[in-house]
Amino acid sequence: MNMIPIIIGVVALVLVISIFFLIIGHSHGGLGIGKRSKGSDAIIKDANKRLAQNPDDPVALYDLGNVYFDEQSWDKAMKTFEHLIEHMTAVDQQRINAFQAYLRYGLSARKLNMIEQAYKGFSMARTYRQDNFEVNYELGSLEFERKNYEKAIQLLQHARTQDPDNPAVLRQLGHSLFRLKKPKEAMNFIRKAIDIAPDDKESLYTLAECYHEANQVEQAIRIFNHLRADPVMGPNSCLIAGTIHLETRQYETAIQDFEIGLRHQNIKADILVELRYKLATTYIKLNNIGKAIPILKQIQAENSNYKDVSLLLKKYLELNANRNLQTFLIGSSADFVALCRKIVITYFPKAKVKISNINVHKSEWADILAEIDTIKWSDLIMFRFIRTQGSIGELIVRDFHSHLKDVKAGKGICITVGTFTDEARKYTEARLIDLIEKDRLQVILNSVDAKAAALQ
């Protein structure tokens, strides 16, 4: 079989197609007037020549803007299209593609981060075509940046009708819904966006936030833990994961989260200070004041007015210097009671003391009933040790007096690390109750160990 005629025919067909596309490639594309067969340089030269005669020549400006746009010379393209649309008349709009002029003006401004100009361009383009994907997506993105989330969602939903699986649209929809406090709706879109673009760490982080706000804590923690090592999202992920663990009293895990977060580089200032603050307060929860104090000092040195750092530092510096005061305020229940027993035994010099009853009310106070026998007198005394640092009012003192009568104690001694109100003082004036405040308590705490040792 002779293949030569077939080969000749194929070559001829390819040649015809090549000539056809060459002609199409050099045409103006139907968007303006004139030919582009001379190439970009020729188009620029011709446009400048016409603009020298008429600076507002719409076709010349349009042609010149398109060349700059295709070359990605965004500054030149934006200025050229801006000149065009500022002087464009209704007749001019019929001679050029006005929609494309506004769209490319907006896109050029967007590339230059000139938000107002971009918004103007896209808004005008949308008056010509409301069904254009690019216009709806860009306008939706700008409304998102302006925090107009309702408008953003409307525009992005329009864009989604043209491209239902576009990851950028799904992403922006999800983030907009999340900002509107609709986590369950948001996570549906964000999950789809992540399926298409799995490297989008910011969306993964937002998905975790959605789970957190929807009380799906396990799913949230799983993602935050996955992101802890990420150089960008890691510090934020560590902060939220640690906060969740802190709130659920998983203190050791919370410390690990905060410490991993602090090992990152280039942490935002607000995240950095909060990581330190949460780490310090977690150490305090574990009564590890020695580790909390240096962190609190660091925060105070850099941001002296941050939250209650100054108050915490003052309080825990004092506690760190006085082990018994620390035990009285934040020690375990067993250590607190042991200290209170020691105070009761040493409170009256040279007395024989027999403790007959101890009652602990949650972590607020402890009541100790003791038989006291001295050379001059013997009596049943009830002690109440109150751990609250604030003001103790009349109601607590009344309750204490009621207990005294119930156990038939001859006298009561009410001790606090805080102060008593005037009402509490007046109530005890005609009753056998001594009120011991912080100053006197500190004297007792400073000497109790030595007195207890002398009795052994």
Image (cartoon, rainbow, N blue to C red):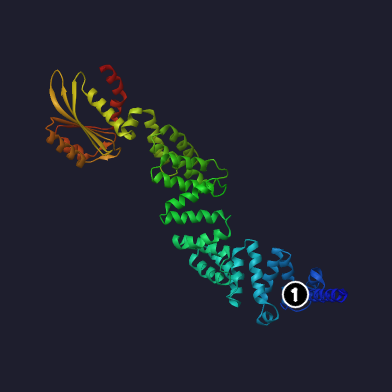
Residue 403 location (% of width, % of height): 15, 36
Asked if residue 440 shows in the view, the reply is no
Q: For the view shown, which residue lies furthest in the front direction?
A: 1
Q: Is residue 278 left or right of residue 99?
A: left
Q: Nearer the viewer, residue 210 or 363?
A: 210
Residue type, numbered disc 1: Ala
Dividing the picture into quadrants, the one containing residue 267 is top right
Q: Where is the N terminus found, in terms of image quarters?
A: bottom right
Residue 141 location (% of width, % of height): 56, 64
Asked if residue 314 shows in the view, the reply is yes
- Local packing at callout 1 (Cα closer than 10 Å; few below 14, some 14-19, many 20+) is many
Q: Is residue 124 left or right of residue 430?
A: right
**What residue appears at the point 18 percent right and 37 percent down from the top-left corner?**
400
**What residue appears at the point 26 percent right and 29 percent down from the top-left corner?**
340
Q: Nearer the viewer, residue 438 or 71?
A: 71
Dividing the picture into quadrants, the one containing residue 229 is top right
